[in-house]
């Protein structure tokens, strides 16, 4: 990981990191003079590895400096797949069939 983060949200420790927080950290990692840039300078080009209580989140970041400041070409993050729900869907039996027995 490139840096370790603890995010407080509504006076509680976030179990991982909010997506908006990871995007902001990725952007800050490319702003000259920022604390995040100082900590992550010279690390992986194109990505930032953010350590948090649930593991590591990879944020994508590509930027370039110009006369108007820093311009971002890529800012993004990915989520891990997790089950949000497990359920049963009920639908009516076709006409002429009994719903309980299938006959």
Image: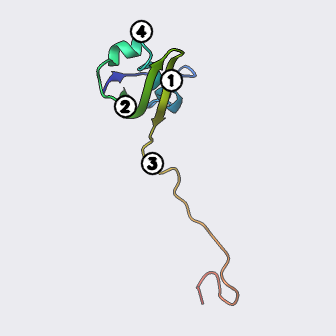
Please give the name of the residue rendered at 38% of the width and 16% of the height, measured from the top-left corner: 37
**Could you say which disc has been placed on residue 82 in the image?**
3
Q: Is residue 84 above or below residue 102?
A: above
Chain-order first, disc 3 or disc 2 = 2
- How far apart are the two marked residues, 2 and 1, measured between alpha carbons? 16 Å
**Around disc 3, counting alpha carbons within 10 Å, would you say few (fewer than 14), some (14 to 19), or many (20 or more)?**
few
The residue depicted at 53 percent of the width and 29 percent of the height is 20
* On-image quarter of the N terminus: top left
Residue plotted at (50% across, 23% down): 71
Q: Is residue 101 above or below residue 4?
A: below
Q: Nearer the viewer, residue 65 or 46?
A: 65
The disc, 1 or 4, on the residue closer to the chain's N-terminal end is: 4
Q: Do the CB atoms of the residues marked 4 and 3 lie less than 8 Å apart?
A: no
Sequence-wise, the earlier of marks 4 and 3 is 4
Instruction: Identify residue for label 1.
Output: 71
Q: Nearer the viewer, mark 2 or mark 1?
A: 1
Residue 80's spot in the image, x, y percent?
42, 44
Task: Nearest to the eye among marks 4 and 3: give it.
Answer: 4
Q: Identify the secondary structure beneath mark 4.
A: loop
- Residue position marked by numbered label 4 in the rendering: 33
Q: Image quadrant of residue 78? A: top left
Which numbered mark, 3 or 2, is in the foreground of this view? 2
> Crowding near pointer 1: few (<14 within 10 Å), some, many (20+)?
some
What residue appears at the point 64 percent right and 81 percent down from the top-left corner?
A: 99
The residue wearing badge 2 is: 47
Question: Residue reaching furthest front?
Answer: 67
Between the residue at mark 4 and the residue at mark 3, the CA separation in whole angstroms equals 37 Å
CB atoms of marks 3 and 2 within 8 Å: no
The answer to which quarter of the image holds residue 98 is bottom right
């Amino acid at each position: 990981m490139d840096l370790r983060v603890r995010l407080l949200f509504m006076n509680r420790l976030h179990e991982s990191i909010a997506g908006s927080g990871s995007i902001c950290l990725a952007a800050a990692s490319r702003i000259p003079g920022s604390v995040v840039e100082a900590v992550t300078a010279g690390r992986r080009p194109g990505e930032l590895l953010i350590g948090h209580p649930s593991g590591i989140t990879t944020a994508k970041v590509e930027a370039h400096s110009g006369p108007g400041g820093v311009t971002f070409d890529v800012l993004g993050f990915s989520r891990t797949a997790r089950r949000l729900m497990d359920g049963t869907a009920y639908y009516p039996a076709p006409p002429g069939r009994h719903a309980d027995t299938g006959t």
